[in-house]
Image: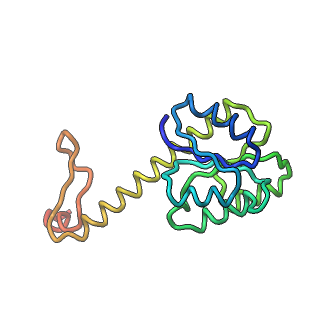
Amino acid sequence: MEGTILLVDDEERNLRMLEAMLLPEGYRVIKANNGKVALEILKSENVQAVLLDIMMPGLSGFDVLKMIRENKDLCTLPVIVLTSLKDKDDRIKGLQLGADDFILKPFDLDELRAKINTQVKLDYLRRQLNERAKLVKVMNEIDEGIIITDYNFVPFSINIKARKLLGI
C-alpha cells in the first residue's frame, strides 16, 4: 500500500511504535505531537489518512477532528481515532464529529493495519468518484456530442449533447 499517514499523538513512544508498524507497509509517515502541529501539516502535505489521539494537551483530538471536518479541502480525509477512552459517549461524540473509525488503546496491530488499509482505499475511491463527477460536469458543459468508450468501444459515458443527437 502506498500513501502518507499523519500520526497525531502527544506521546513520542506511541508515535515511534506506529511509525515502525506503518513503514514496512509502504506508507510514508508524518508525525505530529499535538493538534496545532497536525493542522499545520495538513495545510501543506497530501495525506491519505490521519491516526488521531483524543487525549492531548491544548487542542484535543475532538477539536482537531472538528476542524478537519469543517475544512472544505479536508472534510473527506479519513480519520481513525486512537484512544484509551472506553466510554460509549466519547465514541459517539467522535462519530458525530466525523471519525471514520475508532481503535481502542492498547490496539491490535493487525486490526490497525486492516483499518488503515481500508480507509486509504476508500479515500482513493472517493477521490476517483470526485474526479469522474468533475469530468461529467465538464462534458455536459461542452456544446459538442461526446461519447467515451472502453477498449472494446462500448460506451460508458455519453454527454447530454450526444444523447440529444442520438435520440437517447
Horizontal relation, residue 160 to residue 80: left or right: left
Residue 41, given in percent of the width and then of the height, sits at: 57, 56
132 up-or-down from 138: above or below: above
Report the residue at 27% width, 66% height from top. 138
The coloring applied to the image is rainbow
**Numbered-mark total:** 0
Q: Quadrant of residue 76?
A: bottom right
Horizontal relation, residue 29 to residue 143: left or right: right
Q: Quadrant of residue 24?
A: top right
Front-lying residue, 51 or 127? 51
Report the residue at 50% width, 57% height from top. 44
62 up-or-down from 52: above or below: below
Horizontal relation, residue 84 to residue 136: left or right: right
Residue 26, given in percent of the width and then of the height, sits at: 51, 32
Q: Residue furthest right?
A: 87
Residue 46, given in percent of the width and then of the height, sits at: 48, 52
Report the residue at 69% width, 58% height from top. 35
Q: Quadrant of the C terminus?
A: bottom left
